[in-house]
Image (cartoon, rainbow, N blue to C red):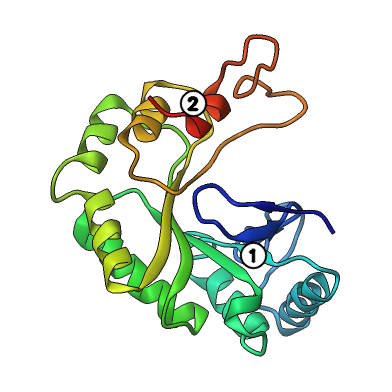
Amino acid sequence: MEYTTFGKTGRKVSRLGYGGTVAGLKNYVHQFDPEEQKNKDQLIDAMQTAYGLGINYFDTAAGYGDGISERIFGEALASIPEDKIFLATKADVGDALSARRSLERSLKNLRRDSIDLIQIHGTVYSDEQCEKLLAPGGMTEALEKAKAEGLVKHIGFTIECQNTALYRFIQSGRFDVMQIEYNLLFQHPYDPSWKSGSLYDAECPA
């Protein structure tokens, strides 16, 4: 298994991670209910097998089945020492109060006193949403306070486009991690020919 330093966290994580979408959403790829016992058992076995093969990055979200995925992750990973894995979850875009409530619920679902990473869970952000998220008293500040309290070690955001909001988040310097869309077909975030794109900006923010 290959490992790399994850964002600004300083932690070494496996390049291959275990994602929790299917562990929460019904019929995501095909007919499948994660709450059926046989399916739940398979998911738990898959996560534990993944850990045994060297995967230490596990990623889920409060929105995957309204907490179902988190609860399955919590059960599957309960027997593994917390310092052996990097556990991430996400909170849906909202205000400071909803962020706090989401985090507290996630802690309960994941059976933890603290979470390694929580990310603002979005796909595309308007300028207005971005402003509210970064504003005093907003969601980002609420997550920063939770970090100061030790409830979460790192904060980040997810996004699936390359727009103004993405670069504002990077330039704010307030996030340890970003989760963006980057694959064989969508390579806009990284242009080695011109040394441009959001991946370069994230590494060397203005």
Is residue 26 something one can see in this rendering? Answer: no
Q: Position of residue 174 (x, y in %)?
A: 33, 44
Q: Position of residue 36 (x, y in %)?
A: 69, 79
Does residue 162 lie above or below 134 as drawn? above
Viewer-side residue, 172 vs 99: 172
- Nearer mark to the viewer, of 1 and 2: 2
Q: Position of residue 107 (x, y in %)?
A: 42, 77
Q: 10 Å neighbourhood of mark 2: few (<14), some, or many (≥20)? A: some
Q: Residue at x 38, y 24 (%)?
A: 206
Q: Position of residue 56 (x, y in %)?
A: 70, 67
Residue 169 occupies which quadrant of the picture? top left
Which amino acid, mark 2? Asp
Q: Residue at x 35, y 30 (%)?
A: 171
Q: Between disc 1 and disc 2, whose residue precedes?
A: 1
Q: Judging from the image, what secondary structure is the residue with disc 1 in?
A: strand
Quarter of the figure that contains the N terminus: bottom right
Left or right for 130, reference 203? left
Is residue 78 something one can see in this rendering? Answer: yes
Q: Residue at x 56, y 37 (%)?
A: 180
Q: Which residue is mark 2?
A: 201
Residue 50 occupies which quadrant of the picture? bottom right
The residue positioned farthest toward the bottom in the image shown: 79
Does residue 8 lie above or below 192 as drawn? below
Left or right for 28, reference 199? right
| Tag count | 2
Q: Which residue is mark 1?
A: 58
